[in-house]
């Protein structure tokens, strides 16, 4: 491994390194059928913009339609790349509609297809040609073609391949946007300064939406912590695992003047303890100091101290566990439910904890015995008649891998929908156990939550959830489909684009509702698979006048009928028109009009 490759790997996070090794191993060769399936799963579920950029810059992968479509539909794909891929998707959608159109319209449709093809990125034109040949009739005696994109050479420049593309032209100012428009902008913006302004907002939902933006970086978060005056924002950043363990973020929490005093004390104390442990205990005074710091350490900081010990001093893990168990025993409060003894202030014996596991009826007592360090006590607590599914589900996130697997294999609790759903979302649950539990999750919502949860790394689990979601949707009638689409807030369009966006009857009846959520209209206006008739219906929807973002997406969508586009163009201000004219994705007809 060269020095450059080593530095590149160091710049990736641990999950990114795992996926990158798979991609680097498969990239120099033509993918097999199983590898295509793996690449499609990564294209749909991967949240790393750098890895998605690498996949989008591998032409012989884009020659497989499922991979290209997955990258185009993944909201974590950098916007400049996603726009280009969406144009390829729109090109084939228009070609399909051209084949079905009446003879009188074919000439006009053909001109639209040619115009759209001329606007494609130069690197995507060969890919589009190859995909077209794959879908066309036989081109030779064997029915195959040897024209394939060239395979990558040896020793690629990974840094250049994963460098994010230049950002799109600046968006219009957010002052004139309504709340749904601001939320959509916070979720999708690629401008660091604009993203920073959303993180500094006083609106809770706006901040949380901005934190889920795929382009939010450690640098932006640190800048926001240094400037924020919202106490709740510091707790929101601290509560997310991807920021909790990062040293620069913790230093920003500690150094920010707006950080709450309690949070600053917790973070500062754990940092002080880590520095003291690093120096060692050369004398009795230093040892007493370490013990004192451990006794003051907050429970929420034990995860960081454990993480530090694993990296710096693995031999100290037993010491950390000792103090953590001591803290748990001090807080257990088991003595109140045990038989009275003359001796006070002592720890409960194993016999007393077993008695409590089988006889306790109060929720706080059951919650503590489920966390008991002895596995025997835990197994007995699972058989306690007073244990409810709600209590067990709320306790599962705090359990380790072995105990989670015990619950997943339990003949009663594994069949309870609430417990099964909590188990599937546990990051340490094995893939076979998760696949068994999927059969006990009723309805569409649990499957949508599985597809949405980035902690679930098992691709087969997400694939099964997607298949179940597709089967449920296809088995519904039109009113139930409309209800499901509105309830999910448009999430079904993201996970089932083909089924939803080709169901024109359902979309037309849903868009006919004058009280429809603007966010759903925005998704439909933006997607290149939305039928032309539905886009025309959106163009006349009463909500359109209050949402400039919907009008912009309709104008940037090459499938929007020309008459509707011209009418919407006249509704925009001169500044908004000039902003759209700077976009490379504006259709040629509107550019000429402008």
Image (cartoon, helix red, strand yellow):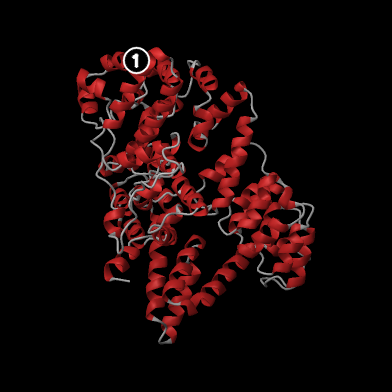
Left or right side of 268 for 493: right
The reply to whether residue 444 is visible in this rendering is: no
- The x and y percentages for residue 331 are 61, 63
Dot 1 lies on which element?
helix
Q: Residue at x 38, y 64 (%)?
A: 268
- The x and y percentages for residue 553 are 34, 26
Residue 88 lies, with reference to residue 94, above or below; the image says: below
Left or right side of 437 for 146: left
- The x and y percentages for residue 160 are 26, 55
The reply to whether residue 405 is visible in this rendering is: yes
- The x and y percentages for residue 515 are 48, 18
Residue 357 quadrant: bottom right
Residue 291 lies, with reference to residue 256, above or below; the image says: below
Q: Which residue is mark 1?
A: 564
Along the viewing direction, whichever of 127 and 424 lies nearer the viewer: 127
Residue 431 quadrant: bottom right
Q: Residue at x 50, y 70 (%)?
A: 295
């Amino acid at each position: 491994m060269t020095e450059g490759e080593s530095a590149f790997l160091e710049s990736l996070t641990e999950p990114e390194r795992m996926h990158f090794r798979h991609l680097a191993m498969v990239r120099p060769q033509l993918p097999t059928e199983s590898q295509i399936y793996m690449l499609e799963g990564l294209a749909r579920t991967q949240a790393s913009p750098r890895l998605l950029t690498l996949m989008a810059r591998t032409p012989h992968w884009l020659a497989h339609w499922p991979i290209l479509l997955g990258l185009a539909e993944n909201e974590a794909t950098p916007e400049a790349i996603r726009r280009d891929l969406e144009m390829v998707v729109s090109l084939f959608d228009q070609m399909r509609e051209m084949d079905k159109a009446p003879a009188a319209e074919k000439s006009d449709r053909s001109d639209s297809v040619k115009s759209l093809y001329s606007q494609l990125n130069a690197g995507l034109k060969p890919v589009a040609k190859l995909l077209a040949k794959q879908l066309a009739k036989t081109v030779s005696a064997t029915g195959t073609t040897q024209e394939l994109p060239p395979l990558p050479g040896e020793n690629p420049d990974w840094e250049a391949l994963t460098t994010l593309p230049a950002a799109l032209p600046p968006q219009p100012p957010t002052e004139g946007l309504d709340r749904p428009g601001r939320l959509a902008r916070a979720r999708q913006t690629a401008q660091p300064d604009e993203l920073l302004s959303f993180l500094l907002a006083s609106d809770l939902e706006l901040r949380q939406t901005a934190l889920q933006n795929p382009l939010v970086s450690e640098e932006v978060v640190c800048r926001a912590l240094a400037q924020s005056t919202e106490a709740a924002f510091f707790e929101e950043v601290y509560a997310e695992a991807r920021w909790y363990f990062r040293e620069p973020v913790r230093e920003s929490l500690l150094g920010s003047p707006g950080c709450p005093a309690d949070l600053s004390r917790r973070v500062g104390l754990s940092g002080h303890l880590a520095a003291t442990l690093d120096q060692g205990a050369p004398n009795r005074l230093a040892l007493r100091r370490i013990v004192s710091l451990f006794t003051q350490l907050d429970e929420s900081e034990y995860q960081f101290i454990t993480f530090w010990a694993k990296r710096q001093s693995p031999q100290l893990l037993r010491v950390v566990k000792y103090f953590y168990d001591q803290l748990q025993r001090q807080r257990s409060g088991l003595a109140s439910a045990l038989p009275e003894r003359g001796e006070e202030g002592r720890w409960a014996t194993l016999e007393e904890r077993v008695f409590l596991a089988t006889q306790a009826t109060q929720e706080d007592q059951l919650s503590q015995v489920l966390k008991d360090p002895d596995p025997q006590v835990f197994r007995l607590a699972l058989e306690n008649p007073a244990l409810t599914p709600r209590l067990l589900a709320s306790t599962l996130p705090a359990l380790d891998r072995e105990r989670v697997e015990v619950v997943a294999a339990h003949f009663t609790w594994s069949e309870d929908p609430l417990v099964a759903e909590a188990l599937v979302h546990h990051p340490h649950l094995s893939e076979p156990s998760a696949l068994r539990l999927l059969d006990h999750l009723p309805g569409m919502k649990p499957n949508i939550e599985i597809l949405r949860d980035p902690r679930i790394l098992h691709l087969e689990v997400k694939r099964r959830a997607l298949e179940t979601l597709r089967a449920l949707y296809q088995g519904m009638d039109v009113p139930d489909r409309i209800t499901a689409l509105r309830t999910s807030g448009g999430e079904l369009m993201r996970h089932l684009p083909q089924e939803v966006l080709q169901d024109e009857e359902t979309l037309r009846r849903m868009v006919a509702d004058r009280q429809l959520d603007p966010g759903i209209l925005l998704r439909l206006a933006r997607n290149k698979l939305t039928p032309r008739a539905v886009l025309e219906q959106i163009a006349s929807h009463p909500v359109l006048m209050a949402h400039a973002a919907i009008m912009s997406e309709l104008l940037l969508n090459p499938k929007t009928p020309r008459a509707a586009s011209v009418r919407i163009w006249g509704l925009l201000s001169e500044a908004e028109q000039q902003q759209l004219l700077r976009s490379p994705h504006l259709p040629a007809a509107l550019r000429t009009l402008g």
